[in-house]
Amino acid sequence: MARPGPDGPPLGFLLSAVGFGAAQRFRSVIEPFGLDPRQFAVLRAVASDEGVSQQACGASLRVQPSRMVALVDELEDRGLIERRVNPTDRRARALHVTPAGRRILARAFEAVGRNEAAVFAALGEADRAELRRLLYSVAASLGLPPGVHPGMGIE
Amino acid sequence: MARPGPDGPPLGFLLSAVGFGAAQRFRSVIEPFGLDPRQFAVLRAVASDEGVSQQACGASLRVQPSRMVALVDELEDRGLIERRVNPTDRRARALHVTPAGRRILARAFEAVGRNEAAVFAALGEADRAELRRLLYSVAASLGLPPGVHPGMGIE
DNA sequence: TATTGTTATACTCTATAACTATA
DNA sequence: TATAGTTATAGAGTATAACAATA
């Protein structure tokens, strides 16, 4: 919400509102798989870095250690990831995705991909590239770290 | 967070992350004035519709009635808005911005405008218009109501 | 009987800091 | 002494539903 103008709401307001809408949509798309955005992020991070420690995983996602515990607890209780002992450091837990976790993740990815296609269906190839370029520019201007979604637990 | 690709994160993820970053920035810009985004929205809405009832204001912003009470309480305690009696319906409160409220709002608007200019400084006039057009397209695709920021209290 | 504003309650989410076991 | 993980506790924020006054 910001200064109103003759040509619609301010760009920052529009950007924030559309981004929020996209996040809401994403949440609803993965909800049928029993995942919320943070759980999805952890599952995806562990899948792409098997054996990562709990706190290292949290650090890359900007999630606090004490929140990682509950997050990993839920995923482990549902049999989607495992805590294994790290032979070189017995304080740390090596996180691994189970076969069931991979199946859920793959199906969720498909649903997310279908949703992306639907949301940006009205835009042609050139428009999507243009939107990506413009968003990167704004991200840089805002000082956002690349590849990290803010608001996951640490600011 | 969604399907990773060779040309960076998925557009939906990027959009959500940048939108969140813009919202965070907005929050930090108005924070020195003692306002959070919802208070700013209420103040702005009342300023542009003097005498509006509390629940009508909440409905236009998608804020629940019981939250409007606390929200208006705070603004009233700080002398920024007033609850007056509505002569035609004594159940309703007519909301009005006080002179002090107008001063705060004007100064906050200035700060928000300066921030907008800074955030989009790297984009030329044509790029801003393009970004606006693309965001409108996505907003329509997401089914977002125009002029309303989701996440203020009712989905 | 419906509506405006209000309050009370219970619930979720979160940060903080203390604790353990290892290093 | 420092670190990985865990747990406990207290606080903020919220939705829900009940309530009083008025329509």
Image (cartoon, coloured by chain):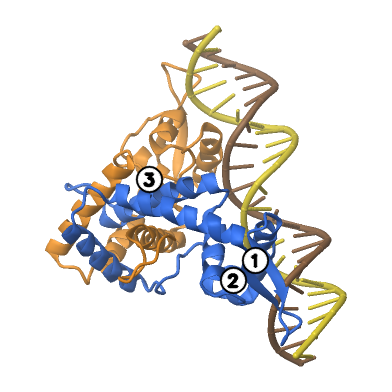
Chain colours: A orange, B blue, C brown, D yellow
Residue under pointer 1: B68
Residue at 45%, 69% in the rendered image: B148
Q: Nearer the viewer, residue B47 or A117?
A: B47
When asked about the image quadrant of residue A124, the answer is bottom left
* Subunit under mark 3: A
The answer to whether residue A35 is seen in the rendering is: no
List x then y, in percent, for residue B107.
Answer: 48, 53
Residue under pointer 2: B58
Residue under pointer 3: A149
- Of callouts 2 and 1, the N-terminal one: 2
Relative to residue A125, is residue D11 drawn left or right? right
Give the amino acid type for the residue marked by disc 3 in the picture.
Answer: His
Question: Label 1: how many residues lie within 10 Å, few (<14), some (14-19) or many (20+)?
Answer: many
Give the amino acid type for the residue marked by disc 2 in the picture.
Answer: Gly
Q: Nearer the viewer, mark 3 or mark 1?
A: 1
Disc 2 from disc 1: Cα separation: 6 Å
Is the residue under label 3 in contact with that under label 2 (CB below 8 Å)? no
Residue at 34%, 59% in the rendered image: A15
* Subunit under mark 2: B
